[in-house]
Image (cartoon, helix red, strand yellow):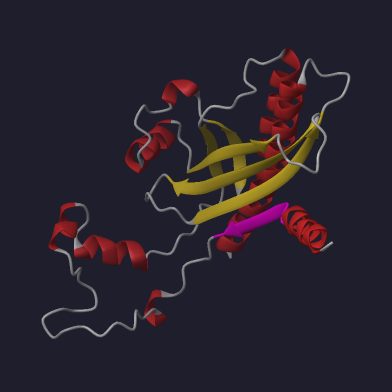
Amino acid sequence: MKLKIILFLSLFIILSAGCQARRSLPRIGSASYNTGIAMEPRFSSGNSLFSSDSEILTDDDVKRILAFKFKPQEKNKIAVLPIGQFLWHGWSDELDKADETVQNSLINRLKESGAIYDASYLPSLLVPEKKTVGHLREAAARYQADLLLIYKASFRTYQKYKVFSPDKSKAYCSLEAVLLDARTGIVPFTLLVSRTFTAEENNGDMNFHETIRKAELSALKSALDEVGIEIVKFMEKSEK
């Protein structure tokens, strides 16, 4: 009896965590920022303790970056870049159309912001082979996009979940998104969204694998919708 209660509570906790999102907080005013770390006399609170750091950024560069407060242009063009490959691509015509619907949904969400006059996916020919911040910033600039929204989704599927019959599957979707300012290279906004979902096979599916792909797309749409909503809020707040 105790074992059944424990299993029930565990399942309840898993299902209750089906919708989560964590986003970064705005940069606080630099004047009131204080690390609170006691420094030796030969060091100042604004200098790196590691000499090798200067090979990447000088101390003055770091100070300027941390003191910078992001403020978007009055009207912005935003490019979107998904990172990674998704298993439903080329699976079926129905899934390809559903994927297009998911992509359009995100674009429409972004255009709800008065600060975004255009939103579109970065053309594949402009996607750099090396996806470093510098190369991605260059690609956005060539596309004349003020901002670049980069997101990466990952999925995990558990088909041996004991509480489900063989034609059902428990799956988990995690989506990480970052917003890159092409002008400065600053990343003023990040968001991590999690979704759990259950896939159940129906007669219209070719097989259970297609069922899982449809469920993944549904979870991705939900996560991207939240990303779009949060970015619109961020842009409107940053304008003020």
Task: State which quarter of the image contains the N terminus.
Answer: bottom right
Number of numbered discs present? 0
Q: Position of residue 72 (x, y in %)?
A: 51, 54
Prevalent SS, magenta region: strand
Q: Position of residue 188 (x, y in %)?
A: 47, 56
What residue is shown at x 33% (from left), y 41% (from top)?
A: 134
User: Is 19 contained in the magenta span?
Assistant: yes
Task: State which quarter of the image contains the C terminus.
Answer: bottom right
165 or 127: nearer the viewer: 165
Residue 91 against residue 139 in the figure, above or below = above
What residue is shown at x 72% (from left), y 54% (from top)?
A: 14
Residue 70 against residue 131 in the figure, above or below = below
| Magenta stretch bounds | 17-23
Q: Position of residue 41 (x, y in %)?
A: 13, 86
What residue is shown at x 56% (from left), y 53% (from top)?
A: 191
Given the current orientation, which residue lies at the most extreme right position?
203
